[in-house]
Amino acid sequence: MANYSLSLSRCQLKSKFNKQGLPVINNSHDRGFTIVELLVVIVVIGILAAITIVSYTGIAQRANVAAMQSDLSSISQRLKMYYTLYSSYPTALDGNNCPTAPNADSNYCLKLSGSNTLSYNGSATTFSAVEANSAGTTYYKVTDNSSPVAVNSMGYGMVSYYSAEDTGNTVADVYSANNGIIKVNATAYYPFDGNANDASTSNKNGTVSGATLTTDRFGNANSAYSFNGSNNHIATSSISFGSNKRFYSAWVKIASTGANTVIDGALQFKVTSSNKLRVQWSDSGWHTVDSTSAISTGVWTHVALAYDGSIAKFYINGVADATTASISAYAGYSPASITIGRDGGGGSEVFNGSIDEVLIGQTSGNNPTDGDIAKLYTLTNAHDMNKPSVTGRVNKGFDLWGYASWANDSTCSYIDMGTGFNQAVHGVATPFTISYWMYRSSGSSSASEKNIGWYGGNYKGVLMGVYNDGNIGVTIGQGNTTGSSSNFGFSAGSAPLDQWDHIVLTYDGTNIKVYVNGSNTYTHNIGAFVDNGDGTQPLKINLSSWSLFEGSRGRYDEIGLWSRAITQAEVTTIYNSGSGLQYP
């Protein structure tokens, strides 16, 4: 039997027709395609079709990107018009991206075409908008007067990013405009950077009488004060000590023996004629106790005095002295002016030499421990408290100091990030991410779990951090707006000692997740019972936002904040990064 091909004829097929016009197949000369040849043709057609589809997809994506950039430009102009009308940018939007605060105006809704989505972050004086295209891979951002620019895909939903490369007391937000400020919560703090202003939250500025600016312990000009041993001093206005528990800390360089008064806050802290430290107080007459060890002339030395209401202890370069002073009868903790470089009574006990970085704290709770004072020496030997930049995990990091006290008067350095983040994530069941690196030092006897977070009262807000034992604690507010009126607290793994550890907390509107060093250590379905507050809560680092207590000792770096829950893959990217995340 002859073999008949089931395929179409070749391109060069020579057909013959009979008288009726029907084709006649010549079996011996006109052979059709084989099955193999047919498959090749099908593959070629498939490739051509795929090329056509890819080409169309690329055109569609480019069209979408162009539309998105056009939308962004339009949004930018719309925001500027809103600002012209109300002298402020929108700080909050409704579900349709229409301004609700500070002024509700549906004429200035931020419209996007297609399936693109908008993430808006704005304050009264600035704004930024970030969008994603429909493919979910390309993101664009416009900030204030800039043109739309492509950004790293992880930038979608980002609110702020702090790379911690700063050297002053301002913490730059390298992604948006929510700059943070280094603050010191203390009774008084005088870094003496060009003046005698109080850099603490107390704002008790000093008045200089005769003392002159000089070079500090780091060689910086006009960054310490020199006292002549005769009549120089710096006085402050009245400061109310709520209890008799307090501590003094300063860097001194004595010019000669008999340097005398360093700090007088009713309880006096001095240097004797034999270069020993002295505590002096009045209780039916004057009493003094001197340290066992002495300090050297002409050398910058850290000195501290801690009084817990019963016993006073001396410290020299972070080391506790052998001598303590029992002064439990002392009752001079009523309001008093602080005098630096001379006794407050206006006598002749004037310091002879240079003084820098004066810190005065008090507490109705626990005083700093020996470990706390040792850490304070180590830290201030590297930088001023309000200039915490040190070599860190990625180039630089923040080195902050504090100690745990349940009283509302802890002394510590901390970062106030303002309300920008809470403005972006406030409300119930609003997704967010907090990502940061932390270094837990050995001997950190005062670490608290509330290292980072915000709090809005009535069980609203988020607080998290590392305990002294390394356990990571998290408190999630289930505010009264959810009907819960409670907090949800949990432990989520641990941060190993003496190393940089990466910690991430995410909430997607349903699930809470914690990641430690790239691994998911905790997941909980909490549902829509997370209340982030009303947008007015400042984010703080190294100090509980709940109240001014529970500072801790630690280093921080590469702090990222998102108004969405980042993915496991993105957590891994951050953890594996050796240079930090970079965004335009």
Image (cartoon, grey):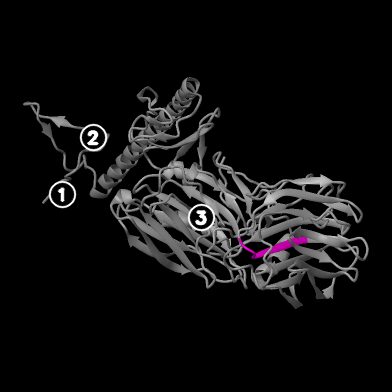
Considering every residue shown, the one lying at the far right of the view is 256
Helix, strand or loop at mark 3: loop
Q: Is residue 381 visible?
A: no
* 310 inside magenta stretch: no
Question: Overall secondary structure of the magenta stretch?
Answer: strand
Q: Which residues are magenta?
A: 243-250
Kind of residue at badge 2: Leu
Helix, strand or loop at mark 2: loop
Name the residue nearer the viewer: 18 or 251: 251
What residue lies at 51% left-to-right and 55% top-to-bottom?
Answer: 547
- 214 horizontally vs 448: left or right: right
Residues at marks 1 and 2, CA–CA distance in whole angstroms: 17 Å
Which quadrant of the structure image shows residue 15? top left
Disc on res. 13: 2
Q: Are marks 1 and 3 in contact (CB under 8 Å)?
A: no
Which residue has dot 3 on it?
547
Helix, strand or loop at mark 1: loop
What residue lies at 34% left-to-right and 37% top-to-bottom?
Answer: 53
What residue lies at 86% left-to-right and 62% top-to-bottom?
Answer: 260
